[in-house]
Image: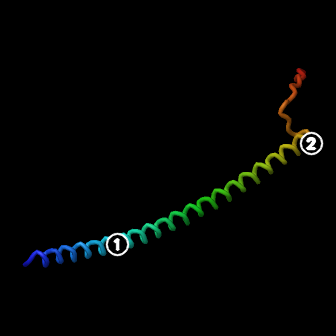
Amino acid sequence: MTTNELTLWIQAGATVAAVAAAIIALVVSALDRKNTRTIAASDRAAARNLVREDRVAALRQSQLLFEHGALEAFGEFSTRRKCRPTQAG
């Protein structure tokens, strides 16, 4: 084998290695993109759940505050209870 033939084989091997590396990079990139989309979908679902839970908690808080105000208005509940002396009989 002459030097020119050896050089051509080395160049052909380098070209094949470069093409293989490019194909592997494309496959890895596609898998990474798919994984990123899966993670993003999961994050969006978790964010929707947090918003839903926050709305439920806010509604419950407003209901409790309304009930608290109503009880105070009717004198059923007071944060400053007055101590009444008991009558001993």
Seen at 72% across and 56% down, the residue is 55
Please, is residue 79 above or below residue 17 in the view?
above
Q: Position of residue 8 (x, y in %)?
A: 18, 77
Q: CA distance from mark 1 to mark 2?
A: 78 Å
On screen, residue 17 versus residue 22, left or right, reads left
**Residue 68, quarter of picture:** top right
Which of the numbered marks, if any, corresponds to residue 74? 2
Residue at 90 percent of width and 22 percent of height: 87
At horizontal 85% and vertical 30% (from top left) the residue drawn is 81
Identify which residue, 67 or 89, lies in the foreground.
67
Q: Amino acid at mark 1?
A: Ala
Closest to the observer, 28 or 61: 28
Q: Which element is circle 1 on?
A: helix
Q: State the quadrant of the N terminus.
A: bottom left
Q: Residues within 10 Å of mark 2 (few under 14, many from 20)?
A: few
- Residue 6, image x, y percentages: 13, 75
| Image position of 47 (left or right of 32) | right
**Disc 1 target residue:** 22
For this view, does 50 lie left or right of residue 89? left
What element does badge 2 sit on?
Answer: loop
Q: Which mark is residue 5?
A: none
35 horizontally vs 53: left or right = left
Amino acid residing under circle 2: Phe
Q: Which x, y percent locates residue 11?
A: 21, 74
Residue at the location (13% across, 79% down)?
Answer: 5
